C-alpha cells in the first residue's frame, strides 16, 4: 500500500504502464523507490488513473518463475482510490493498530 502520484501512462501490448512517483509507502512487503512503474493487465486504462492525480494504491509485486520479470502489478482485486486528507488519516490509524 502506498500513496503515489501518476506521472505518465503508456499502453504496452495488452497492458497499461503507469509511471508513479511514490509519495509515501505504508504497508509494504517489498522496498519501493521514489519512482516506480505500476502495471495494469489490460488496455482499457482501468482503473482510470489520471496523469497528475494522487492515489492510495494497493498493488503486489509480481515475479515470474524465471525471475526475469519483477514488477508492481495492480490486479482486478487491487485497490486504487483517489488520495484525500481522509485517506492519510485512515492510513496513519491503521499503521498504529498493526
Image (cartoon, helix red, strand yellow):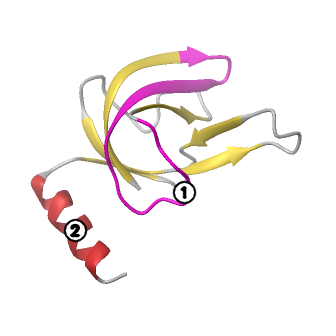
Q: Which residues are magenta?
A: 11-33
Q: Residue furthest bottom?
A: 97
Q: Residues within 10 Å of mark 1 (few under 14, many from 20)?
A: few
Give the residue at x 29% y 43%.
Answer: 55
Q: Are marks 1 and 2 in contact (CB under 8 Å)?
A: no
Numbered circle sitting on residue 77: 1
Asked whether 51 or 19 is in front, the reply is 19
Q: Is residue 3 left or right of residue 90?
A: right
Give the CA distance from mark 1 to mark 2: 23 Å
Q: Is residue 6 left or right of residue 28?
A: left
Vertical comparison of 37 with 1: above or below? above
Quarter of the rendering occupied by the C terminus:
bottom left
Q: Residue furthest left?
A: 85
Give the residue at x 69% y 38%.
Answer: 70
Q: Position of residue 48 (x, y in %)?
A: 37, 33
Asked if residue 25 is among those painted magenta in the image, a careful observer would answer yes
Q: Say how many tags the image has.
A: 2
Give the structural element (helix, strand or loop) at label 1.
loop
Vertical comparison of 15 with 97: above or below? above
Q: Residues within 10 Å of mark 2 (few under 14, many from 20)?
A: few
Residue 6 position by quadrant: top left
Give the structural element (helix, strand or loop) at label 2.
helix
| Residue wearing tag 2 | 92
Amino acid at each position: 500500500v502506498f500513496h503515489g502520484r501518476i506521472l505518465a501512462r503508456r499502453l504496452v501490448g495488452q497492458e497499461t504502464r503507469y509511471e508513479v512517483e511514490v509519495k509515501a509507502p505504508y504497508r509494504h512487503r517489498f522496498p519501493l523507490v521514489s519512482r516506480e512503474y505500476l502495471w495494469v493487465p489490460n488496455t482499457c486504462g482501468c482503473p482510470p488513473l489520471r496523469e497528475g492525480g494522487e492515489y492510495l494504491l494497493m498493488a503486489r509485486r509480481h515475479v515470474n518463475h524465471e525471475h526475469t520479470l519483477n514488477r508492481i502489478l495492480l490486479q482486478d482485486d487491487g485497490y486504487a482510490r483517489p488520495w484525500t486528507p481522509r485517506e492519510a488519516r485512515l492510513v496513519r490509524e491503521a499503521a498504529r493498530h498493526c
